[in-house]
Image: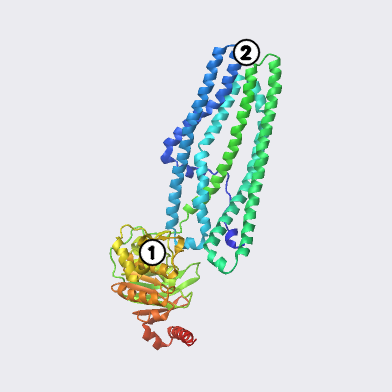
Amino acid sequence: MPNDYNSEDEVLGKAYDSKLMRRLLSYIKPYKKYVIFAILLNIIVASLGPLRPYLMKIAIDKYISHGNLKGLLYVSLLLLASLLLQSFIQYFLTYYTQYLGQKTIFDIRRQLFIHTQNLSLRFFDKTPIGRIVTRVTNDIESLNDLFSSGIIMVFSDVFIILWILGFMFFMDVKLSLVTLSVLPVLVYGTFLFRKKVRESYRNVRLHLARLNSFMQEHVTGMYVVQIFNKQIAELKRFLSINKDYREANIKSNFYYAIFYPGVELISAIATGLIIWYGGGEFIRGSLHVGVLIAFILYTDMFFRPIRDLSEKYNILQTAMASSERIFKLLDNQTFIKDPVNPVYVEKIKGEIEFKNVWFAYNNEEYILKNVSFKINPGETVAIVGHTGAGKTSLISLLSKFYEVNKGEILIDGVNIRQMTKENIRKFISVVLQDVFLFSGTIRSNISMSNDDIPFSKLKEAAKIVGADKFIEAFPQKFDEIVKERGATLSVGQKQLISFARALAYDPQILVLDEATSSVDTETEILIQRAIEKLLIGRTAIVIAHRLSTIQNADKIIVMHKGEVREIGNHQELLAKRGIYYKLYQLQYKDQEIIKTA
């Protein structure tokens, strides 16, 4: 099993953490009037249930035993009224607690999503996507249970117990003490149950997270799984993970299967004690039969909220573990922080300069080493080199997806450390080799759902890159539905849409990262012609393996093992007979071999 699944941060903290709870309760503050209203309803509805056995005691001892039909009718109407009132209040209580839960969860999920979007790419490089999805879905839903049926409804259980104890001690103190004599056994059993459930719950959450991570990764990579015929092998791995999850749930259910019948047994013992002691008192004439019946009813009613409180404990434990993970994500500060007093640039010429830039993804394993070069406004600069030379890292640093370790990057003479991410990125459009399209329409993918971009500009961008031909051929044209990751489009069509997307934002700096590597020759020629028109007045950075596509570049930067080894135009670099010359010769020979074949 890969390390990603074993490294899941499912460490279970305290069953109840006051700091976490205070932080959770802070999300309820905007809705405190609903909380107060719900608690008041809880106090009322909790009293109505225990009121009925007491009314039955009155009906038996005061009216039935004396043959008073009128009084019996009066008590019966009171019983009916209490039932109707309880149902009416219970409706509002359920509605408001669920409303409170949904409003609170909405706020937390929104905050979590906003926070996740603002985290730097360094965080996503190291964190499995399945884990993040689990935080926003499963863990958030666990908090929903706490807010809607945990925090508020626990008051109901506590108030019911207090009302029952109040009525019991009011009627007969000795019989109440006899009834409660089984409580030490119940408390000890509950303690053991909590301990075992806590351990089993940790395993359930751990295996669920592993299952989510495995599913997310393999559904995303289904193309690779199928092309290498790995379905059976991956099924075996899935069955192993799924089996562990099943076994963890079965073990957890085992403890519930022991605890709940145990509570029922203790309740039965308490009922037996009432009949034994209360029956003796009744025979001796010191206890009314109505009191005896009321106590039997109260005993059954007393242990019901205790069972519910055990379930609330499970909800609390789930919420504590989930909130710990959610807050761990919210507290993650892997940000590219904007300066306190940023320099805001309204418009740029497009001058870019790297000055002694060093960069490493991990510690001091430098990908870029002392990189220095300058791109003048309006220049088209190509960056070439072997895989892993650091070409794409240059673009990531320029777009401020990562921060340089040493050195500085300047745009029009301004250090990008002094600029906000938003300010920098509004000047840059990037076309990547691996195109990502969102579910929606072609229009929304080109505009990125930006309503400020007029439709005429979207059509113009599509026309310039040659995407309008296939778009207009669709039945819905620009409103044609795009499935997840653009599954219904060809690789070339997706590439052209990403090109139109970049151009629709009218960037001063255009970055093409292997942008034409996934299109056929005819489409590439079309794009190259479009690029020639587009690059007028723009600074362009072109990363390419096909050297034939960048021969007309104003400047070519040759990267090798993270260092700038050569700079010049096509003819100058060929004349040097260095790294660029060798790369060109290799590609030329490959092309000659293909032509000969």
In the rendered image, residue 50, in percent from the top left (x then y), is placed at: 56, 25
User: How many C-alpha atoms fall within 10 Å of the one at disc 1: few (<14), some, or many (≥20)?
Assistant: few
Disc number lying in front (2 or 1): 1
511 horizontally vs 241: left or right: left
Residue visible at 53% across and 56% down? 131
Residues at circles 2 and 1 in contact by the CB criterion of under 8 Å = no
Dot 2: within a 10 Å radius of its alpha carbon, few (fewer than 14), some, or many (20 or more) residues?
A: few
Q: Position of residue 595 (x, y in %)?
A: 46, 86
Label 1 secondary element: loop
Numbered badge on residue 333: none
Front-most of residues 301 and 373: 301
In the rendered structure, the answer to whether residue 115 lies left or right of residue 258 reads left
Which of these two is toward me, 532 or 313? 532
Q: Which residue is mark 2?
A: 65
Between 597 and 74, the one nearer to me in the picture: 597
Q: Amino acid at mark 2?
A: Ser
